Amino acid sequence: MELRTLKYLLSLFKNGSFTAAARANYITQPAISIQLKNLQKELGIKLYEIRKKRVVFTEAGKIVLDYAEKFAGLETQMLEHVRDMRGLKRGKLLLGTIDAASIYILPEVFSNFKELYPGVEINLEIASTVPLLKNLEKGGLDIVCGTLPLDLSEEYEIYSIYREPIVFIAPKGHPLAGSSDLNCSQLSLYPFILFHQESVTRRIVEETLLKKGVSVKVSMAIDSQEAIKRLVASGLGISALPLKTVEEDIGNGDLETFNVKGVSLEREIGLVLPVKRYLPITLRAFLEVVRQVLDVNLPDEYCLNGR
């Protein structure tokens, strides 16, 4: 059995046809068909069937695919180790981050990192925390910068890098705007515009208010904080967002804040590291810059100078 044959099987699964798999591997369609037929003969079991011109994997095929992915992952790790030996003249860092962190927490880190390692490319994926974590788990990202708290397995470690208050916002002239001692129960009278349900920031808001006996009425759920601000400014509802993201809008009069008696909201932003996985040198170099720029207490073994 050859590793490349298992790669062909993975490619067949991902691309959905022999023609597409062959194209992805720069070989002919008959060649990939022969290789995979030989693999089935060697294993003595059918791995896939063709049904109405569709490739459908059997239960045995799914098991072999699982191992093929593991072999491919090991090969990737091997190549990363070898690449590490060549230094940091080239490379790639796959970073997933929430938009707020990319705007006002990480820019100085990016700038310093680029100055030190101009040949290393930073690929950013900007999304909410939960989708980023799913991609990290699949191996599509090296590290995630997301909103805390998170309940993760021991395969991951979390390091806080930033704390910020969350404030209630309303459009200019709204009955709640500018109030300093609102009763919490008054919030149930107005529609909220919040992040989607899987959002950690939304969970912080809802759980805090629920402890006060208030179940908020969410009229719109949106991923973009910019969209939330615009919709609130248009008078379509109230919301709660991190202070840093709304300071400019408050300053120019588009939005106003209000305080609720006995309610204090705060969120934490942190790094999620897959510590049971090999940490490539590009990631350890990035963590060293994070440690220096943001003064984060990261373990030596995860940073470049600690290797």
Image (cartoon, helix red, strand yellow):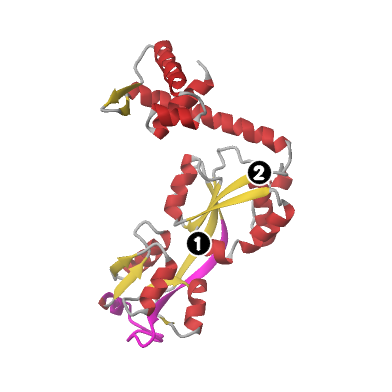
Q: Is residue 247 above or below residue 196?
A: below
Query: Which label's residue is closer to the chain start, 2 or 1?
Result: 2
Question: In the image, what residue type sits under mark 2?
Answer: Gly
Q: Residue at x 48, y 32 (%)?
A: 24
Are discs 2 and 1 less than 8 Å apart at CB? Answer: no
109 in magenta: no
Distance between the Cα atoms at labels 2 and 1?
24 Å
Identify which residue, 24 or 6, lies in the foreground: 24
Q: Residue at x 43, y 67 (%)?
A: 225
Q: Secondary structure at mark 2?
A: strand
Place of residue 99 in the rendered image (x, y in percent of width and height, measured from the top left)? 50, 62
Place of residue 129 in the rendered image (x, y in percent of width and height, measured from the top left)? 45, 55
Q: Residue at x 49, y 26 (%)?
A: 7
Left or right for 44, reference 69: left
User: Which callout, 2 or 1, points to the residue nearer the camera?
Assistant: 2
Residue 91 numbered tag: 2
Residue 171 numbered tag: none
Which stretch is magenta?
Answer: 160-188
